[in-house]
Amino acid sequence: MESKIQPFFLTFFLFIILTHAEETLGTYIVQLHPHGKTSTLFTSKQNWHLSFIQQTISSNQDPSSRLLYSYHSAMDGFAATLTHSEFKYLQNLPDVLSIKPDRLLQLQTTYSYKFLGLNPARENGWYQSGFGRGTIIGVLDTGVWPESPSFNDQGMPPVPKKWKGICQQGQAFNFSNCNRKLIGARYFTKGHLAVSPSRIPEYLSPRDSSGHGTHTSSTAGGAPVTMANVFGYAAGVARGMAPGAHIAVYKVCWFNGCYNSDIMAAMDVAIRDGVDVLSLSIGGFPVPLFDDSIAIGSFRAMEHGISVICAAGNNGPTAMSVANEAPWIATIGASTVDRKFPAIVRLANGKILYGESMYPFDRRTRTGEELEVVYLSNEDTESQFCLRGSLPREKVKGKMVVCDRGVNGRSEKGQVVKEAGGAAMILANTELNLEEDSVDVHVLPATLIGFDESVILKNYINSTARPLARIEFGGTVIGRTRAPQVARFSARGPSYSNPSILKPDVIAPGVNIIAAWPQNLGPTGLPEDSRRVNFSVMSGTSMSCPHVSGIAALIRSAHPAWSPAAVKSAIMTTAEITDHAGRAILDEDKQASVFATGSGHVNPQRALNPGLVYDIRPEDYVAHLCSLGYTMSEVFSITHRNVSCHEMLKVNRGFSLNYPSFSVSFKGGMSRKMFSRRVTNVGSPNSIYSVEVMAPEGVKVIVKPKKLFFKRRNQSLSYRVWFLSRKRVKKGNGMDFAQGHLTWLHSQKGSYRVRSPIAVTWKS
């Protein structure tokens, strides 16, 4: 009897599961044809959008209950909650271009402006650009803490007349929180609430609960703040890259990340609000451009003259990990600065292990107490990583606990150790992080050591019955290390979806960056009883992105007529390939490749006066997408331009995008490639430029003409480059590549140097 019932029960059970899955609501982004035939039947875009939902759902439901957002500027379409069967039905309706499930993305200073050469001297770039006055930087992030002194509007000019945005009220946030510095603030929750209907456990307003958005906003355009420091570390004057710029904040990221539907809604509004620069310290893994909401929204922003700056992502050092790869986006990797916060570990056997920390030590007790060291590697993996609830109090009380880095947050580990009764902590890098030195503000005496040091430490612990050590804090040290270097976590090229474009574009400071922080919030985002935290330290390409966003604002202020492509070109062709000692930029212990640095390390002073720029029109990007083999519908979904790629490439035979860098790929027996480029003179009239080439190994490079003669400003001239493969260069690491550069030198010695990196790969 049992054997006969069981199959029926299993079938019925599966039917229930499948039926339930069919009826589960998910969030989808629906892209519509911008000139859809059915759109003329409705008085507004929103009514048009609602009509699609009305046709899809049952007749007794209100379609507005399913609509999350109507998009008008970043794209034509809407976000809605649908069942799987409704999604399938909607796919086949007229004027529907594509439907994508909502995707969850993740978030990826008192000194960095000095490190980049910006200072208040009258001959410096800040004065040349008016400190970024008149420009508006839109920041998509976790919101803002408006009371931070970095958003003080003293000395700021009036709000620009072009500004159409608002200061949206919400929990603990009202109109008075905006001023002439922080001119706008909005928040977007519908994508999150569709997935997590329960109340979001943070401020339902533009107010920042995590600190990330406050940090990035102040890095981009924070006002000068004297006596800024983090518990006494790195004391000085804090300024953003464009301290005269206005800031508009769009809160799209919440406790569990950032949904594409909310990001698209913010970009949609920001375009209409009138921002000049959009800064997105948001990203994930690379996806095709026609599936990338940020790429689609930023194309429309670029068409409106907005420079879009995005983080490259923190998935390094893995190759092909760089995100935000669209050629109309400036993609920013991370570098180090030459400021350190030493906190060495002195072992009882006399050995010294270098570490770093920002624990607020008392200067009279700079040297910590000698304590017994414990590493619970034999307990379980959770104890090894110091996960919450994993540390037995009887084994760690009063001791210095070693916690391997990874799985949970670095600051959280310290909190776990403290709650278990531990007296101090050593954070030990694993082989994944090697010698990376991202410091933190800790809640107990603690330091971070590199992988080599962690091996020495663990060998010492295993060699003695009672290992002892103390932590000695060294404060702030500047100028004793080579910098900039590539941050290990910074995502690397080549581009996954678009290998004909070299990404990232540039690198900028992203390690141990100090910037504004919510008051009375500790580095873990939790309230602290007795501390007032106005500034804190963070690392990531999230930090490097707003540096370049601020620099883009400086350039826009100095050159308001320049296109986003010209602004990006200026940043790329003036970037540095050497560190402050004049030696090659390092990636770990070797010379950095172009797949780690792109064009190099950003130099704001030179970027304001680049000499020549590579400009790109929106229609050039369309031709580029056609050259990648995208279908007509894929090109249309990104650009809203109905083109025949066959006809476009026939007219533009041998087309190559006028990009400020070269990415050359030889496939099979191919041994020759030609690129055409066009440069515009934005420097002095009657200028002569000569070409200088450092050819990649195994490749011959021919440039014609070898000299460019400009009679006037804004004159454009073209040149061609032939790359001839002589021999395949084998690197032995799974990717055969070589690199070099092409530079246009002004005839006046010591004047303009307009440099383009060259990346060459060979594929079977």
Image (tube, helix red, strand yellow):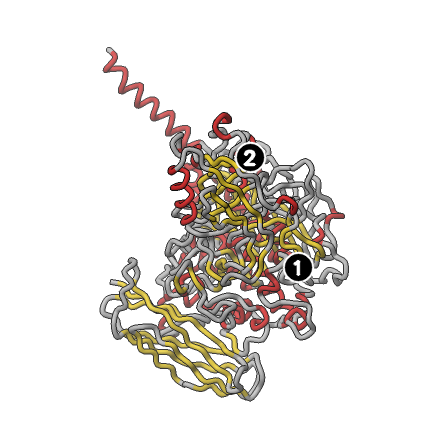
Classify mark 1: helix, strand or loop.
loop
Q: Position of residue 136 (x, y in %)?
A: 65, 60
Classify mark 2: helix, strand or loop.
loop
Q: Position of residue 277 (x, y in %)?
A: 59, 61
Q: Position of residue 467 (x, y in %)?
A: 45, 37
Judge the density around disc 2: few (<14), some (14-19), many (≥20) Cα neighbours within 10 Å: many
Residue underneath mark 2:
423
Image position of 4 with respect to 600: above or below: above
The one nearer the camera, 297 or 759, is 759
Residue underneath mark 1:
239
Q: CA distance from mark 1 to mark 2?
A: 36 Å
The one nearer the camera, 604 or 379, is 379
Which residue occupies 47% across, 38% down? 402
Mark whose residue sits in front, 1 or 2: 2
Answer with the quarter of the image where residue 442 lies. Answer: top right
Q: Amino acid at mark 2?
A: Ala
Image quadrant containing the N terminus? top left
